[in-house]
Amino acid sequence: MPSLTRTWAPALAVCLLAFSSCRKDCAPADTGPPLFGIAFSTDTLGTGRGFHEAEALSAYLVRYADANLSRPLDTVRTNQKPGNFFYVDRTLFCNFPASAGAADPHSYRLEVPATKSRFDIQDVVLQYGGPTDCTRSIDRLDALVNGQRVDARRGYVVGK
């Protein structure tokens, strides 16, 4: 019985060659949902509203089954692996998959107990544009954070 590699290799090579000749500059498509990201401000001197590391590390994220933050599903803490939290340089980031629409009405609450801060993330809007040379583009990714509409494509920084 011939191996799968020898049987499929010629066909795969032709397909890859045809694909690469049409789309030379395309990165591999990311099939996962886009992330809605929030960064914790580290500006403790200028505005005085930034988080110290220990304060930021007290944070946890609660995911709700509805848009009204009334039916909690699960909680993710900063020390859990794999998690939604990660540190880069001196800044803690919180990411979660963006989901939108009546079929998936999740909402989130980001709690920072050390500073008695709370951030409610509701009404996530995710809209794709038409196809580009490589993949669909994201035309809109935003949500209400404590009642304020935030464009996640520009990044969002929270302070205490």
Image (cartoon, grey):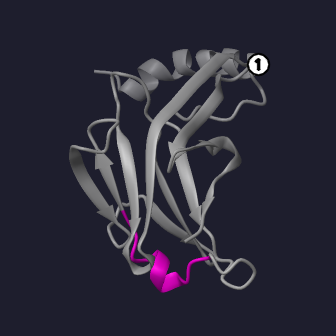
In the rendered image, which quarter is residue 118 located in? bottom left
* Relative vertical location of residue 87 with respect to residue 13 in this rendering, above or below: below
* Relative vertical location of residue 112 with respect to residue 131 in this rendering, above or below: below
* Picture coordinates of residue 151, whole percent (x, y): 65, 41
The secondary structure type at the circle numbered 1 is helix
Q: Residue at x 38, y 48 (%)?
A: 108
What is the magenta range?
Answer: 50-60
Dot 1 crowding, Cα within 10 Å, few <14, some 14–19, many 20+: few
- Residue found at the far front of this picture: 147
The amino acid at mark 1 is: Ser
* Picture coordinates of residue 21, whole percent (x, y): 76, 19
Q: How many tags in the picture?
A: 1
* Picture coordinates of residue 147, whole percent (x, y): 52, 45
27 vs 19, nearest the viewer:
27
2 relative to 127 in the view: left or right: left
Which quadrant would the C terminus be assigned to in this image? bottom right
Q: Residue at x 59, y 31 (%)?
A: 29
Please check the rendered image and state whether residue 89 is part of the magenta-colored stretch, yes or no. no
10 vs 57, nearest the viewer:
57
Which quadrant would the N terminus be assigned to in this image? top left
Q: Residue at x 50, y 66 (%)?
A: 86
Can I make out residue 32 in this image? no
Q: Which residue is mark 1?
A: 21
* Picture coordinates of residue 25, whole percent (x, y): 78, 30
Please check the rendered image and state whether residue 59 is part of the magenta-colored stretch, yes or no. yes
136 vs 49, nearest the viewer:
49
In the rendered image, which quarter is residue 127 located in? top right
Can I make out residue 87 in this image? yes
